[in-house]
Structures are given as structure tokens and as C-alpha cells.
Amino acid sequence: MVRQRVRIRFRKQGDLRLIGHRDLARTLERLFRRAGLRLATSEGFHPKPKMSFPSALAVGIAGVDEVMELELAEPSSADELLGRLALHAPEGLTFRSVQLLPPGSRKAQLHSAAFGVPIPEDRRVEAAARVAELLASPSVPIGRRGRAEPIDLRRFVEGLELRGGVLEIRLRASREASAGPRDVLAALGLAELEQQGTRITRTKVELET
């Protein structure tokens, strides 16, 4: 039997930003059941719903363009799926779009992700200078716990700009290692902003074509 593969884009905001990836997956599983959607499952003694995420979102970071894929055990239209999901979505979770994928299409792979970080007015001059310094640096080594060699943050940074009081960060994905927005803030000397109430938002998830 041919299963229907679906790609969903959604927002995870508000208090939901404080739950981890596994808790989010369990929340979505319960939501799909309430919505009456039958998901395809893996085989074996402990079958699990066939759900996948190209990039897990770190705890404490909101997302306005998150992506997940799943397989349905029975066909449905995109409009019907979107409507049923919207009826059962908890506060902080908003479903933006549903795309029916053609048979044989490969799983989504992350290409890059963009983030936005509001910068307090009294830190913007300093932040702009440090952004320029980081962009001009050929290498920005950062340590990783449990990793003998540092990774080069600079090779992950595809875009970095302070615009309208918001630090816009675009990071390239890699299967070898990873870098996140908190690494960039630390490299800019702005790591303490999050502790002072600044919230990081992932604004875009770009997939490989």
C-alpha cells in the first residue's frame, strides 16, 4: 500500500518554546490522534509513528517556520489536514501549511536556518562592530564539550547583519558538525542577553532542493 507523505510547516511560540524536541514530538502525536489522523508506523515490537524533523529546535528558542514530515495510513487532502490540525492545536502551536509530497520523494534535509535576535539599543553600536569583526575573520574557532578539536564557527555563518535593531543570523547546515545562534552570540560577546530576557527566534528553515 502506498502511504501518503506530508510536509507540514508550523510555528512553535510562547511557552511551547520551553519544551524539548521529544516533548514536542509527543505533543504532536497526541494532537494527531485527537484530530483523527491515522499515521503510518514503523514495524517491530514497538511501532512508532513515521514522523521526522529535518532540524530539532533547541529549548528556549521559538520557531515561526518549523518543518516536519509524516506518513499517513490513509489519504487526505492538504486543506482537510490543515483544518483538522488547526482545530486541535494547543496555544503556541500554529500550523501554517500542509504539502502533499509525491511518491518516492526523499526526506527533507536542512540546508540552512535563519534566526532573529533583538539587540538592546545600548548594545547596538558594540554589536555592529563585533559583527564586522567576525565577518572579517577568516576563522572563528569555538570549543565543544566532548570534542578534542574546536570547530570553525566562521564556516557555518552564511549571513550576519544587524538591521533595525535585530541581529539576523543565517547558519549553514553540515553533517560533520553544527553551530547555533547561541554560538554566534557568544562569539560576539552577547551571550548574556538571553539571560536578561532577550528571546531568540528561528525565522526560516531552508531545505535542500
Image (cartoon, grey):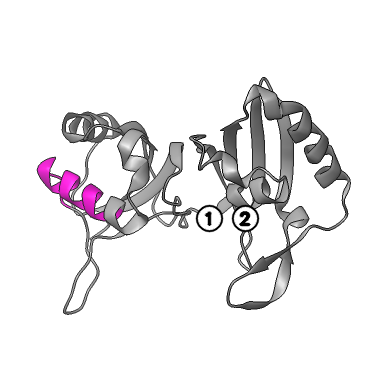
Task: Give me the residue at 66% from left, 22% from top.
Answer: 121
Left or right, residue 180 beside residue 34 = right
Label 2's element? loop
Q: Which residues are magenta?
A: 25-38
Q: Is residue 119 left or right of residue 129?
A: left
Residue at left 65%, top 39%? 169
Q: Earlier in the sequence, mark 2 or mark 1?
A: 1
- The secondary structure type at the circle numbered 1 is loop
Q: Residues within 10 Å of mark 1 (few under 14, many from 20)?
A: some
Image vertical order of residue 120 relative to residue 176, above or below: above
Q: Which percent across, then down, holds residue 119?
A: 63, 29
Closer to us: mark 2 or mark 1? 2
Which one is nearer the viewer's eye here, 61 or 110? 61
Residue 2 drawn above or below residue 61: below
Q: CA distance from mark 2 to mark 1?
A: 9 Å
Disc number at residue 109? Answer: 1
Q: Is residue 33 left or right of residue 10?
A: left
Predominant SS along the magenta part: helix
Tell me which corner region of the image, top left, top right, bottom left or bottom right, holds residue 204. top right
Position of residue 30 measured from the top left corner of the image (x, y, whole percent):
16, 49
Examine the structure image and report whether residue 32 is included in the region drawn in magenta. Answer: yes
Taking depth in this image into account, of 153 and 94 the one nearest to the observer is 153
Does residue 208 appear in the picture of this structure?
Answer: no
What is the three-letter code of the residue carrying label 1?
Answer: Gln
Find disc 2 in the rendering and name its residue: 173
Residue 169 appearing in the image? yes
Label 2 sits on what residue type?
Ala
Quick check: marks 2 and 1 in contact, CB under 8 Å?
yes
Mark 2 closeness class: few <14, some 14–19, many ≥20 residues within 10 Å: many
Of the 4 image quadrants, the one containing the N terminus is bottom left
Relative image position of residue 172 (x, y in whole percent): 66, 51
